[in-house]
Image: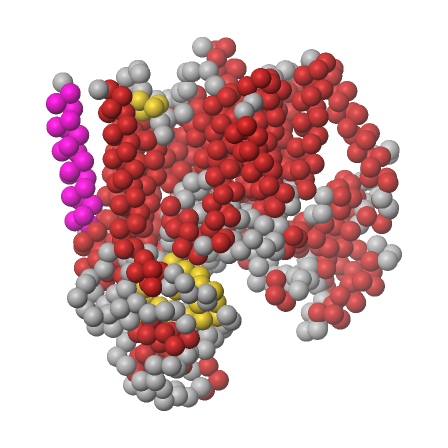
Amino acid sequence: MENKEKIIKPSLLILLLIAIIFSPFVIRNGGDGIAPKTIDDSSIGYYQSTTCNLSLIEVMLKNLNNKNKLYINNNDYVGIECFGKVTGLDKVNDTFFLSIGTNSTLSFIIQSSIWLILLFIFSKKREDKIKISSAPIFIVPFIFTFQVVAESRFYENSNIYFSDVISISNFYLLNYFIAYLLISILLKDIYESRNVNIIYLLPFLYLFNGTFLGMNLNIYLLFFSFFGIQSIFMKKTNKKFDVAYILFSGIWIINKNATLNFFDGDKLRGFINSSNSLYSTIFWIIVFYLVTTGIIFLISEIKEEIDIKKLKDSFLIAGTAITSVGIIGSMFPLVNFFNFIIFGQNKRGMKNLLSVDGNTWRGFAPSAEFIGEFYAICILFTFYYFLQYFKQIKVGDVLMVLFCAFGLYKTNNFAAILSLILFSLSLVIYNKYKFSLTRKNLILTIAVFLILFISLLQLGDYEANSSLLIEEGILHSELYLYSDNYINYLKKDKFFSERDFNSLLIDEGNDTRASTSLLLLVDLYTTDNNIPLLPNIVATISAISLLINRTELWGIFIAKYSPSLTEATFGYGPFQLSNYLFDHNVRLDVPGSKYGSLFLPHSSVLDSIIFFGFLGVIGFILYCVRNVYIGNYSRNIFSYLFLFLILNILKSDSMLYIPTFTMFVILFYKTFLDDRIKNSE
Amino acid sequence: MEKEIENNCGISPNNKELVDIASDPNFVFENDPSYNAITLFDLEGNVVNVNSWVECAHYVNGGWSNVSTVSIDGNRLIFFGLILCTLLYVGIKKIYLSYGK
């Protein structure tokens, strides 16, 4: 009887899920005499004037054998009467763009339903009874409805119903408030009745990205914030962290220089501040704190031992699914469209299997680097499992590893591939010789690595490479003001052969237009006070940047990043990129087609410096180093993965995506906090 | 009408003239990459996205506007739907729990 219920209940929920996802795109008002037509040049006018009548599925059924190139666009702005219906057709080059109405408020409700049902299905029934506070149910709606007002510039362009007037008759805001309330009630009920284990769910964050259509919000922000508030009410937050964060928050708020800049989020949508206002800064300060404490709360509440086999399966299933949906989505426009809704992608998946810039293919994911790192972690973890339990490896595992390896190969993430090989080799050595990581061994390993690394730097032309980073920074800066950028280039280049950067900055008042970070680096590079025997810090970073192919991107960062002393010390605040992106004028030395592209810093350390300043980043590094030095860290696969992740995100922006951010916090917890909490218990 | 077009579509770029398209079903509007797409509505709530000033002016000439007259109803519909869902969930949960006891 119980088994029967175990099958019937999830089956009914899956049926409900299918109905929720597809019915809006099938149902239409019949009897109006309007029929779908084959999509070609002659039907463009018809589809442009016959809007909000034809459903997506009936148009697709009519065009089953249509050989024309088709791409289905989501139109989040239109009203609910157009939901799932054709709202237009356009032709750009040889591709037809079919617009489908996906009102963002209704999409928000549908997507939340999908993900909450899935969370319910894929978590086991709790054996122990627990009761958590109801307070977050009432706090979450206020915080997240506030976001709509705080980031009004984002939301006014994404929903026809938008209104930020604080009024009881504003149904737009009321809708979000009630939806957040309902989601919070459901979250509480699910957590109290189901065993929600964040560790096993972690790999699936890379599959279900959780970003809502037409919103700068992610389901995981709601989810973790709910438990962050829970953590506050249960007095489980870290007091020292709280005090430091309050201090930083005060400085961010007092120092806030609000501007009208607007960042549409692009591939970071859902986990980035789109405005540069005081309200939006306050919102993201609160959310960052709640998300971080929420993740730590969820992981600290797990009492059971982690089943390595189960976690390996989670990684492999998620990795295989990501590769598969990426390939299928690139082949079929309809799947590509539904992937966006069902999985909550930040950015639409690739339209075909062809690699683009730098020979990369991101497939389903918003960024090739980000997903490449995930594939590498999937393979590394499976390799670890393989070494531990050799006899239990199955054909299915090998097949899934092949899927992950194919995905990794397509992302062309060389750093992830190289670090995967190195870490796998060290796992073999560790397994064979049972190498114990004592403090002496750790210092010895670091020394060997440093010597090897310095030797590697000397292999190239260190002298020439030492100034490349500054030269790139200068090339992308708006120093000379000639309208022809080639003249600007020649003027700058004249100083490069002598590396006379100080003269270049004085020339024609360039120092008044250079970023503060460029001025600082030139100062550090040309100083007479170098420490004997130690290489110049700027020269070393420059040579490293060349080795890992980051010279141009970090050069752009130097040209753009121009903080004041306070901003450099404390940062601009969590997820606040607007100042970095728009405050300082640059003239990028990139091809015209790329001029409007989003240039992120391409290092999570640099991202963190923008958000939390040098004080925040150095404080975090010192905390980790101190704990490693005194031996206060776990020696298990999680600390190993943490090191792997840190090495990779040094040269990527992956921390700006919520799955990697969550993984970082979890691995940090497992490395530095877990044992301590257990000991204190 | 010129004022209406300017209000909805902005000022004509490079003094472009509104061409007479009449009701030619084969006419294809050319996309203007420098023009920010605009969503227009008709009285029945139909929606069209226009990607050039000429296209926008043509639709406004035909009675379309960037102000929707039916959008309030959708908002209310979602509102009552959400209230119903919340009440239903709370009600069913209460019945389920009392049944369990």
Give the percent coordinates (x, y) of residue A494: 83, 63
Give the percent coordinates (x, y) of residue A627: 61, 20
Residue B88 magenta: yes
Viewer-closest of A633 and A352: A352
Above or below, comparing residue A530 to residue A434 in the picture: below
Give the percent coordinates (x, y) of residue A535: 82, 37
Name the dominant secondary structure of the magenta segment.
helix
Q: Is residue A47 left or right of residue A585?
A: left
Which picture quadrant has residue A48? bottom left
* Rendered residue at 36%/30% (across/down): A122
Residue A479 magenta: no
* Rendered residue at 78%/51% (across/down): A468
Which picture quadrant has residue A641? top right
Whether residue A71 is visible: yes
Give the percent coordinates (x, y) of residue A572: 53, 45
Whether residue A634 is visible: no
* Rendered residue at 79%/34% (across/down): A453
* Rendered residue at 66%/19% (across/down): A629
Viewer-closest of A136 and A310: A310
Q: Is residue B97 left or right of residue A419?
A: left
* Magenta highlight range: B79-100
Above or below, comparing residue A241 to residue A346 in the picture: above
Q: Is residue A74 left or right of residue A656?
A: left
Label count reads: 0
User: In which quadrant will I find the C terminus of chain A?
Assistant: top left
User: In which quadrant will I find the N terminus of chain A?
Assistant: top left
